Image: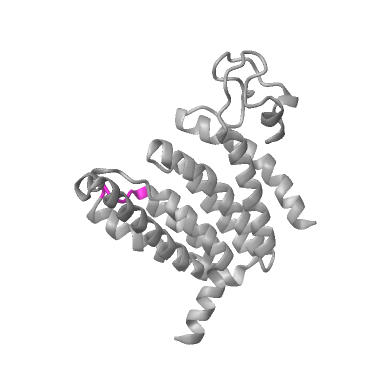
């Protein structure tokens, strides 16, 4: 039942995240203003704004002007629902559930905005960090010091390459690494490892396809890889850390 409820709330949250992804880079408010069709600017009716279902009923088109509605909208809603359900399914206790939900909710818009605009907004990372600090301290005060230490360690780990190669690693990535640490604790090490491996594999694939010189000139946002690593760490981070400590 918890997983089903998490998925249902995830759909609703995903609908809001679509607003965040669209409006935040434009500097528009995400808290006020009704959703409207970008083509005809007609306000979207409440019954046409049901996550996933409305897009399917309308066959991906505006009811008023017939303009196509991007499939990204239902995909973001569905993906958020899956992530919320995943956290509910794998989390061991209340603090893991809360911090996991906080993290995946932030990772969805961060991934899309970084892909679209090559930046990670402070308007997402900073509130997420504050919420993670408050929630972690309230629910698990004994473990907060470890999470803060993990956040600092992760941020410093990425700060060094960001200072050496500012064109390859941004400060937004450094801040996101800190947020991952606040939500994941020591499992952030797994998130960073997965992010670096997956980013490197993509770079190698790009070099093989387009040539080394062209690949070196291609800007690749690192935020999506950190987000992917964060999700992997939510699922398998703690078992991997425990296995490592038990064997080494």
Q: x, y percentage for residue 44?
A: 67, 21
Residue in the image at 43% along x and 57% along y: 177
**Quadrant housing the C terminus:** bottom left
- Determine whether, in the image, residue 205 is placed left or right of residue 15: left
79 up-or-down from 96: above or below: above
Q: x, y percentage for residue 199?
A: 37, 55
Q: Main secondary structure of the magenta part?
A: loop
In the image, the segment drawn in magenta is 166-171
Residue in the image at 42% along x and 59% along y: 195
Of residue 68 and residue 16, the one placed in the foreground of this image is: 68
Residue in the image at 80% along x and 56% along y: 1
Residue in the image at 58% along x and 40% along y: 76
**Residue farthest left in this picture:** 213
- Determine whether, in the image, residue 147 is placed left or right of residue 92: left
**Residue farthest bottom in this picture:** 247
Magenta stretch contains residue 167:
yes
153 up-or-down from 84: above or below: below
Q: x, y percentage for residue 8?
A: 73, 46
Q: How is the image coloured?
A: one colour
Of residue 195 and residue 106, the one placed in the foreground of this image is: 195
Q: x, y percentage for residue 67?
A: 58, 18
**Residue farthest front in this picture:** 209
Magenta stretch contains residue 38:
no
Total marks drawn?
Answer: 0
**Residue farthest right in this picture:** 1
- Determine whether, in the image, residue 185 is placed left or right of residue 83: left
């Amino acid at each position: 039942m918890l997983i089903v409820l998490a998925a249902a709330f995830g759909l609703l949250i995903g609908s809001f995240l679509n607003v965040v992804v669209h409006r935040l880079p434009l500097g528009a408010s995400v808290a006020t203003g009704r959703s409207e069709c970008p083509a005809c600017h007609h306000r979207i009716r409440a019954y046409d704004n049901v996550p996933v279902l409305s897009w399917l009923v309308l066959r991906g088109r505006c009811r008023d002007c017939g303009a196509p509605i991007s499939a990204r909208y239902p995909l973001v809603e569905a993906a958020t629902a899956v992530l919320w359900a995943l956290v509910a399914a794998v989390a061991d206790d209340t603090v893991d559930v809360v911090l996991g939900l906080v993290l995946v909710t932030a990772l969805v818009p961060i991934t899309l905005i970084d892909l679209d605009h090559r930046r990670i907004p402070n308007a997402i990372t900073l509130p997420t960090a504050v919420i993670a600090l408050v929630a972690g301290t309230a629910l698990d005060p004994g473990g907060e010091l470890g999470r803060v230490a993990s956040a600092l360690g992760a941020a410093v780990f990425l700060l060094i390459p960001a200072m050496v190669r500012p064109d390859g690693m941004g400060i937004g990535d450094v801040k996101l690494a800190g947020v991952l640490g606040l939500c994941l604790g020591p499992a952030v090490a797994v998130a960073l490892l997965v992010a670096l491996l997956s980013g490197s594999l993509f770079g190698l694939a790009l070099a093989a396809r387009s040539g080394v010189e062209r690949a070196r000139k291609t800007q690749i946002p690192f935020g999506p890889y950190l987000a992917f690593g964060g999700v992997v760490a939510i699922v398998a981070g703690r078992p991997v850390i425990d296995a490592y400590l038990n064997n080494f």
